Amino acid sequence: MAKQGKTYMGSAFFFLAFITMIMFSFTVEAAVKKYQFDVQVTNISRLCHAKPIVTVNGMFPGPTIYAREGDTVLINVTNHAQYNMSIHWHGLKQFGNGWADGPAYITQCPIQTGNSYTYAFNVTGQRGTLWWHAHILWLRATVYGAIVLMPKEGTPFPFPQPSQEVNLVLGEWWNTDVEELVNQGNKLGLPPNMSDAHTINGKPGPLFPCSEKRKNVKHFSEYSTPIPFSKNSNSSRKN
Ligand SMILES: *[C@@H]1O[C@H](CO)[C@@H](O)[C@H](O)[C@H]1NC(C)=O
Ligand SMILES: *[C@@H]1O[C@H](CO)[C@@H](O)[C@H](O)[C@H]1NC(C)=O
Ligand SMILES: *[C@@H]1O[C@H](CO)[C@@H](O)[C@H](O)[C@H]1NC(C)=O
Ligand SMILES: *[C@@H]1O[C@H](CO)[C@@H](O)[C@H](O)[C@H]1NC(C)=O
Ligand SMILES: *[C@@H]1O[C@H](CO)[C@@H](O)[C@H](O)[C@H]1NC(C)=O
Ligand SMILES: *[C@@H]1O[C@H](CO)[C@@H](O)[C@H](O)[C@H]1NC(C)=O
Ligand SMILES: [Cu+2]
């Protein structure tokens, strides 16, 4: 009986250790984060002007990429739009991995209409919030989004933990087609027309016509937290 009990205990311990090892490997080992980016034309309306724009997955701004240090990120970009295009992961360090950097005609040929290209990179030695954007023509006016690089799991904030984190992606909106604008500017030898509004997360704000009505607006100071932006700070974020 006693012997049996011991054996039972022993195997239970072994089993627990095994489970712990599995969990440990899940939390500590690098993950592979996969994203599908369908570059497609979508009708979007701002300032009472609807127009077809190039988006990723029909979103404006596009989807946010989340990864932790040590993770491998695979982003399969499928181009359904009429433009040949590429996407650049702005500020991301591509150690010995230039072909995943994205500038068209510099590190790669553009992804042709109807084709796919998988960007593969490891997140190494950096953390913070960056952004990605189309890197050809003026497509970056609408093809962009955030990249959030977090430290390995269990790493505390180097400042008091904020109650909430919100991505703020700044951009501009033109009522007319951005490629037409830049072509017209180039023909005339003039800078392209100024944008019709600045945007935060793709929205011009309640003071512009046809904007969403304000709802549940919380006072900003509730969320603001002193973020050390000094160069040497390991928490510094750049865009
Ligand atoms: C966008 O809207 C225009 C005009 O209403 C329409 O002709 C076109 O099919 C729409 N395109 C998409 C992708 O929904
Ligand atoms: C990328 O997406 C395209 C279109 O969905 C698919 O055909 C292709 O197999 C995908 N490539 C990879 C490497 O997942
Ligand atoms: C896309 O690239 C192909 C191959 O170089 C070219 O034939 C085509 O004209 C390009 N499309 C556009 C819209 O520039
Ligand atoms: C990412 O890191 C892994 C493990 O070190 C390596 O096998 C892989 O080739 C790296 N991938 C890229 C795209 O650098
Ligand atoms: C940031 O750096 C400080 C001083 O070097 C260190 O004590 C702290 O643990 C670091 N925090 C993180 C999150 O790496
Ligand atoms: C740029 O602005 C000028 C002056 O307002 C206007 O005539 C022109 O149509 C605009 N260009 C485009 C492409 O909207
Ligand atoms: Cu950039």
Image (cartoon, rainbow, N blue to C red):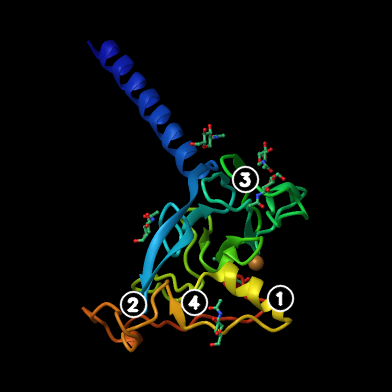
**Element type at marker 1?**
helix
Name the residue tied to disc 2.
48
Mark 1 Cα shell of 10 Å, populated few (<14), some (14-19), many (≥20): few
Q: Which of 205 and 65 is in front in this view?
A: 205
| Label 2 beta carbon within 8 A of ligand 1 | no
- N-terminal of the pair, mark 2 or mark 1, is 2
Q: Which three-letter amino acid code belongs to the residue tagged 1? A: Lys
Say whether mark 4 is within 8 Å of ligand 6. Answer: yes
Give the mark nearer the N terminus: 1 vs 3: 3
Query: Mark 3 falls on what kind of element?
Result: strand
- For mark 4, what is the residue? 174
Residue 221: quarter of image: bottom left
Label 3 beta carbon within 8 A of ligand 4: no
* Tag nearer the camera, 4 or 1: 1
Whether residue 236 is visible here, answered yes or no, is: no
- Where residue 119 is drawn, which disc sits there? 3
Question: Picture coordinates of residue 129 (x, y %)?
Answer: 54, 67
User: Which amino acid type is marked by label 2?
Assistant: Cys
Sequence order check, earlier mark of 4 and 3: 3
Residue named by callout 1: 187
Give the Cα distance between marks 3 and 2: 36 Å
State which mark lies toward you, 3 or 2.
2
- Residue 8 lies, in percent from the top left, at 29, 17
Q: Earlier in the sequence, mark 4 or mark 2?
A: 2
> Tag count in the figure?
4
* Mark 4 and mark 2 residues within 8 Å of each other at the beta carbon: no
Q: How far apart are marks 4 and 3 (CA)?
A: 29 Å
Q: Which amino acid does label 4 sit on?
A: Trp
Indicate left or right for 2 with 152 as reference: left
Q: How far apart are marks 4 and 2 (CA)?
A: 11 Å
Q: Which residue is drawn at 26% across and 16% down?
A: 5
Pair 2/1: label in front: 1
